[in-house]
Amino acid sequence: MLLAAAALAVVAAKLSAAQDIPHYPGIRESDGRVIVDPLEPPWNAIAKIQTNIGSRCTGVLVAPATVLTAAHCLYNRLTRGLLQPVSLHVLVGYREGVFRWHRLVASYTVGNGFDGGKPPPQTADWARIELAEPIPDAVSPLRIAQQPVASGMAIALVGYNQDRAQLLMADPSCHIGIVTPRAGGTLLLHDCSATRGTSGGPLLTREGGGWAVVGINIGAGDLANVALATPHVN
């Protein structure tokens, strides 16, 4: 009886501890995320995007002064409008409050027809940020993938997740699932582990001996995460 009571107490303690852990949508039971070094390629091309209203997302450097991210990261739900460029900060080489470079934003464009008041996902949910000053040559921007996206394609997803917001994390071994072409773009479901904060983070695939951006993450869900194929944003 004492052993049974002790076993029940252990089970109850585990259940209580599990209930104390916040639920983060998009994190799989087989969480394959690992911490990566934001100062080493290709991870050094990943940016943390912060706004003056306190929101945070991820972006990817695709040219020395150009960053791709998700449009909804730049949307102010209180004013129901897009933030001004002066409200945005792009941090490269960020880890635990320290960053290698900080850049202000000169301008940005979002996908044609993007409306932050509409429910996700939207094929227009992308933004192209032009930095006020380029990132030095020490960082090699990542190119947009030229191969067509396809179900089953091996990918990696990298970004600043809400549950580990001070660290850059990647799920290096995941895959594209359902590919859904729509007017204005192509939506991608994928099985990478990622949660809020990784919006705008790149889906990377191997191409030509290096890494290329095949999509950007735009939403976290319990059944699947959603991304947007990138070729049409060039």
Image (spheres, rainbow, N blue to C red):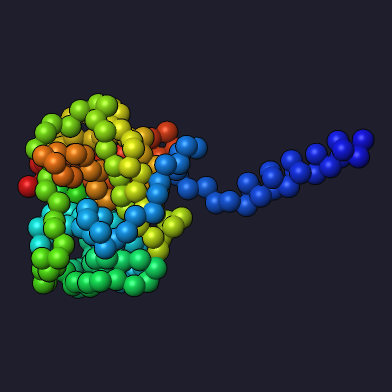
Q: Which residue lies furthest to the right in this view?
A: 1
Q: Quadrant of residue 232?
A: top left
Q: Residue at horizontal 31%, vertical 66%?
A: 94
175, above or below 62, in the image:
above
Q: Position of residue 185 (x, y in %)?
A: 15, 37
Name the residue nearer the viewer: 188 or 212. 212
Q: Residue at horizontal 20%, vertical 68%?
A: 84
Q: Residue at horizontal 18%, vertical 45%?
A: 211
Residue 146 in view here? yes
Looking at the rendered image, the quarter that the N terminus falls into is top right
Q: Where is residue 225 in the image (x, y as percent from the top left)?
A: 35, 39
Side (left or right) of 124 relative to 22 = left
Q: Where is residue 208 in the image (x, y as percent from the top left)?
A: 11, 39
Numbered circles on residues, count = 0
Residue 78 in view here? no
Name the residue nearer the viewer: 18 or 5. 5
Side (left or right) of 146 relative to 91 = left
Side (left or right) of 26 relative to 118 = right
Q: Residue at horizontal 9%, vertical 58%?
A: 63
